[in-house]
Image (tube, rainbow, N blue to C red):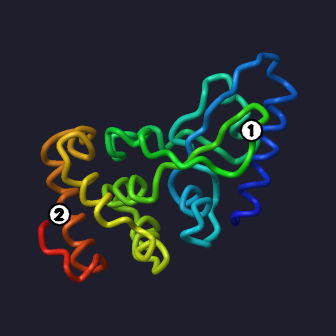
Amino acid sequence: MDQKDILRRLERLDMEAFATIDTQHMYKMIIVGGSGLVLLGVISRATQDIDALEASPEIRHLLAKYDANLRVSTFINNFPYNFEDRLVLLPVGGKKIIFYSCSLEDIVVAKLYSNRETDRQDLISENVVKNIDWDRLRRLALDEDEAKASALNEQRYRDFLYEYGEYVRRYGPDERTDI
């Protein structure tokens, strides 16, 4: 799926939720991973599915029909603790579902925790590197109440810090030396 395909599926998901759920409530879905990066406009590769970190319980029964899933929610500890403070509203839906993506920097942190080759390739994409707010990424990686607070344990966080340090050294701003 490319960006148009993802947006079309999300729009159809919203329309079906609007047509079949008879309440006044609005629901939320947070998209991450490759599909989140595609929707943020920083990568253009095709993705197999739409990774949702969270989706309101009332709409979960509809997700598979639109190639969306909550499998990535198993890895919520890879996202900085306060990721919801930085959600990005996506320009789709709104009849019944409000769609968000995690910020680029929150997704980068989660992908730095991963050992998957696809995640590594996303991280070194020229457009991803160019669009990172490096100061924000530094805060998310190093502040006590962000990546460290959500890590499963100290060893996992130390492994993340190593990956983060290598990433900044290879792709970060030249003047960055305080890791």
Neighbour tally class for label 1: few under 14, some 14-19, many 20 plus, Cα within 10 Å: some
x 21%, y 72%: residue: 166
Query: Which mark, by number, is residue 121?
Result: none
- Count of residue discs: 2
Q: Amino acid at mark 1?
A: Gly
Neighbour tally class for label 2: few under 14, some 14-19, many 20 plus, Cα within 10 Å: few
**Distance from the alpha carbon under mark 2 to that under mark 1:** 40 Å
- The residue nearer to you, when weighing 119 against 142, is 142
x 79%, y 34%: residue: 95
Q: Mark 1 or mark 2, which is nearer the start of the sequence?
A: 1
x 46%, y 67%: residue: 118
Residue at image mark 1: 94
Task: Please state the horizontal and vertical placement of residue 178, each as a whole percent of the image.
Answer: 12, 68
Asked where in the image residue 83 lies, by quadrant, the reply is top left
- The residue nearer to you, when weighing 144 against 170, is 144
| Residue 119 falls left or right of residue 100 | left
Task: Please state the horizontal and vertical placement of residue 3, each as a whole percent of the image.
Answer: 69, 64
Quadrant of the frame with the C terminus:
bottom left
Asked where in the image residue 163 lies, by quadrant, the reply is bottom left
> Nearer the observer, disc 2 or disc 1?
1
Q: Amino acid at mark 2?
A: Tyr
Q: Is residue 113 above or below residue 169?
A: above
Residue at image mark 2: 162
What element does badge 1 sit on? loop
| Residue 111 falls left or right of residue 140 | right
Q: Is residue 169 above or below residue 15?
A: below
x 64%, y 59%: residue: 48
| Residue 81 falls left or right of residue 93 | left
- The residue nearer to you, when weighing 138 against 22, is 138
Quadrant of the frame with the N terminus:
bottom right
Task: Please state the horizontal and vertical placement of residue 65, each as a whole percent of the image.
Answer: 76, 41
Which residue in the rendered view is the most extreme toward the right? 19
